[in-house]
Amino acid sequence: MNSFLEASARQRIEHILDPGSFRELLRPELRMTSPHLAQLYLPVAFDDGVITGEGLLGGSKVLIASQEGRFMGGAVGEVHGAKLVGLSKRAVRQNCTALLLLLDTGGVRLHEANAGLIAVSEVMRAILAVRAAGIPVITLIGGSNGCFGGMGIVAKCTNFIVMSEEARLGMSGPEVIETANGVEEFDSRDRALVWRTTGGKHRYIMNDADGIVPDSTDAFRHAAIGAINAYRSEKMAAELTLEALGDEHALLQARIDKYGGMADSTSIWTAVGIDDASTLPLCDIDRFLERVNTVRISIRNRSLHMLTFN
């Protein structure tokens, strides 16, 4: 198995795309480094922690961005965000088949303060413009940093989210929640609790993720191809309507009303109809899908079962 979790950002691109098809934009020798980090005497990276480019996926032209979680936790600063925005605009100009985002990030780069916050908001706007142009945006999450903060919102702005069991997705990270609300609210040292709450299995059951795969670059590649085929076969529109947004909000409120008082995700899993829910973290992905696919919470008006990628 080629572990997606252990791979670098460049290795993930290499394994996801068709062999030899990747062409990097803003190549390393151009040294697109952050001006803010240098002013603070902090280390910089020649690509500012994100690789952008284009290539083929199953023979179709796609644009792709991959965050390097080993540089500042994949955090987004001004240059990092600008590269994502530029890639999104290029996707629209070229009318490519899909835009792939391989996210591995703790969110905004706090060292860059407002520049980082503005960058994330610009990325959100750019992603929505890609969707409005009828181009699917597919997010793959399987890195050690998970996907948190503003980039968690960016992920939810995309058409499809595919996660591994080891992945995590959320707004505030465990340490942030514990700092703000105390250890009794959320113990960030309880790793099992962290994964039960923000990990791929829980996000899939709650329909925050559209697909879940093993920790394998091959599995993520097939999932991305499956998402493109699903988009094509269902001829889905951009779905950026006020009605669709209202449906999402209503469903989120219903989730809060029904599950908001529960202290642990295992209680939620039991409530949605999963027998012997406490054993779910021990299941491999195939067994997990067998147990949850008939009961997972439905959010969107589209067939997501085809994104299980068995």
Image (cartoon, rainbow, N blue to C red):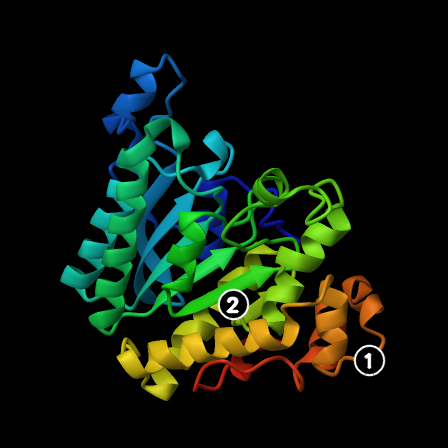
Q: Residue 292: give x, y in percent of width and height.
A: 70, 79
Q: Residue 96: give x, y in percent of width and height.
A: 24, 65
Q: Type of residue at label 1?
A: Asp
Tell me what residue is drawn at x 49 percent, y 43 percent.
11
Q: Residue 51: give x, y in percent of width and height.
A: 36, 41
Q: Residue 88 is drawn in which quadrant?
A: bottom left
Q: Is residue 111 left or right of residue 23?
A: right
Tell me what residue is drawn at x 71 percent, y 42 percent.
183
Mark number, residue 275: 1
Q: Which numbered disc flags the more N-terminal residue, 1 or 2?
A: 2
Q: Is residue 277 left or right of residue 230?
A: right
Residue 12 in view (yes/no) = yes
Q: Type of residue at label 2?
A: His
Q: Nearer the viewer, residue 245 or 16?
A: 245
Q: Quadrant of the C terminus?
A: bottom right
Q: Residue 37 is drawn in which quadrant?
A: top left
The kind of secondary structure element at disc 2 is helix
Mark number, residue 183: none
Mark number, residue 222: 2
Residues tagged 1 and 2 counted as in contact (Cβ below 8 A)? no
Task: Name, please, the residue furthest toward the left.
Answer: 93
The kind of secondary structure element at disc 1 is loop
Q: Residue 307: give x, y in percent of width and height.
A: 53, 76
Mark 1 → mark 2, Cα distance in angstroms: 30 Å
Residue 215 in view (yes/no) = no
Q: Is residue 231 left or right of residue 106?
A: left
Q: Nearer the viewer, residue 191 or 302?
A: 191
